[in-house]
Amino acid sequence: MGPRTQAFERALEESTGAAHAVAVSSGTAALHLACLAADLGPGDQVVLPSFTFAASANAVRYTGAEPVFCDVVSPLEPQLDPSAVVEQIGPRTKAVLAVHFWGYPAAVGELRALCDRHGLRLIEDSAQAIGAKVDGDRTAGTVGDLGCLSFFSKKQLCVGEGGAVLTDKEALAARVRSLRSHGMTTVTWDRHRGHAETYDIVELGFNYRIDEPRAALGLSRLPRLASDLESRRAVARGYRERLSGLDGLELPFDDDEVDRSAHFAFPVLLERREERDAVREQLQERGVQTTW
């Protein structure tokens, strides 16, 4: 966590508009630390979508808190439904975890207002959505109290493995920085420069540090992110134009959401399992990877 990591964090702050970006070892580490910084623990409940990747719920469970699964809007809009969230809020609810699935923005503006009314933390899982636009022209991960990014090899900004926590709150950023490196009061880079002779460990922390080579790679790739996202959007528009109107196939989300999405994946919905499996097999024969 030397000069390249610090430069990468500053570049992420400038790119996303977040006051603080804390680089970590993975997107899952980012989610875990965000949950800890939100003071989640045994007895607490967190509302999150039932349609998500396992890491969203796992990060809640790592803290001892209980995931409360909530319905999404529809199969064609598989994002957390704010009206359904209201029904899941109870006396033990402490946070809402919104997921920008496939890179498409969730309704975090509505969820932010809902959390404010009920005194809840809002955490954004933006692991698939770096660069997506939410709540007007804001960046995914900057509306909630904490936002989580992933730089895994399949992501839009990939360094092999890595992640970051975004927040506008200095206290939350300081907690994440402490937790990512064993709760140590100084890090190796500080001691190398003679800024400290030793260190203390003030809380139970983790080895969730990103390394300098991955930070350097992220720093070199970040200036290309905007153009890379525009390329993805152009491909998505092409797919939507060519696939629209086909019998038995539906396209989630609306055409007007293409320019707001970061397009981690291009989702399609088929009527029957047999058709889905046949399409996947034929795509695989052509070298196109799919999942379900």
Image (tube, rainbow, N blue to C red):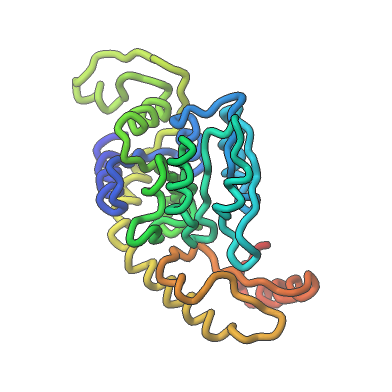
Inspect this view and state whether residue 83 appears. Answer: yes
Residue at image x 51%, y 35%? 32
Q: Which is nearer the eye, 45 or 86? A: 86
Q: Is residue 223 above or below residue 227?
A: above
Q: Which is nearer the eye, 110 or 249? A: 110
Residue at image x 48%, y 29%? 36
Residue 45: image quadrant is: top right
Residue at image x 58%, y 53%? 83
Inspect this view and state whether residue 160 appears. Answer: no
* Percent position of residue 158, x then y: 43, 54
Q: Is residue 186 above or below residue 98?
A: above
- Extreme-right residue of the structure: 274
Q: Is residue 227 left or right of residue 37?
A: left
Q: Is residue 133 left or right of residue 249?
A: left
* Percent position of residue 108, x then y: 45, 52
Q: Is residue 43 above or below residue 77?
A: above
Q: Which is nearer the eye, 253 or 272? A: 253
